[in-house]
Amino acid sequence: MPHAHYMNEALLDWTVGRTGLFTQETHYLRAWTVLPALDGTGGTEVTGGSYAAVTIVPATHFNTAANEFSISNDGVISFPTATASWGTVVGTTIGDATSGGNIIRVITAATPRAVVSGQTLSYPIGNLILTQY
């Protein structure tokens, strides 16, 4: 089961000197019709209709943080074009695997979007915003 507390635990371990911070060259953006809980339980990921997680490389898909609270994509990030209805996508996650694995970030969509056959779910430049609080 995905584990959304993964980053919180990694940051706490780093804060007290138990581990070093890591860099991972590849992450995966996944779309959900029901977002998983913070403990990684529940959630309904999109399936079928040519759906596939999107491989993202943080060093090339995201700009450098301009302030201490947020960062956004500096290029368009698109899922494959749907060949059947995906349902209403309510958000995405960034994780370390195309399925299962650890959830690094849960991103709730500002406006849920129904994706039907022939449509492409995309994040235009600057629209996939990660905030730190």
Image (spheres, rainbow, N blue to C red):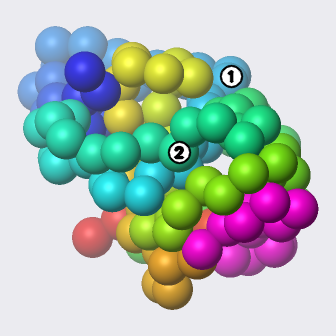
Closest to the observer, 93 or 15 = 93
- Kindly report which numbered mark, 1 or 2, lies closer to the viewer in this rendering: 2
User: What residue do we see at 42% from left, 58% from top?
Assistant: 33
Label 2 packing within 10 angstroms: few (<14), some (14-19), many (20+): many
The residue identified by callout 2 is 46
Q: Give left or right: position of 28 versus 60.
A: left
Closest to the observer, 112 or 22 = 112
Magenta residues? 114-127
- Visible residue check, residue 122: yes
Residue 7 is one of the magenta-drawn residues: no
Residue 123 is one of the magenta-drawn residues: yes
Image marks 1 and 2: residues in contact by CB distance under 8 Å: no
Q: Earlier in the sequence, mark 1 or mark 2?
A: 1
User: Residue type at mark 2?
Assistant: Val
User: Residue type at mark 1?
Assistant: Glu
Q: Give left or right: position of 22 versus 133.
A: right
Image location of residue 90, percent across then percent down: 44, 68
Main secondary structure type of the part rendered in magenta: loop
Closest to the observer, 29 or 112 = 112
Q: Is residue 16 above or below residue 107?
A: above
Q: Is residue 51 above or below residue 81?
A: above
- Visible residue check, residue 129: no
Disc sitting over residue 61 in the figure: none
Q: Give left or right: position of 71 versus 109.
A: right
The residue identified by callout 1 is 25
Image location of residue 44, percent across then percent down: 36, 45
Quadrant of image for the C terminus: bottom left
Q: CA distance from mark 1 to mark 2?
A: 24 Å
Image location of residue 85, percent across then percent down: 66, 58
Circle 1 sits in a helix, a strand or a loop, which is it? loop
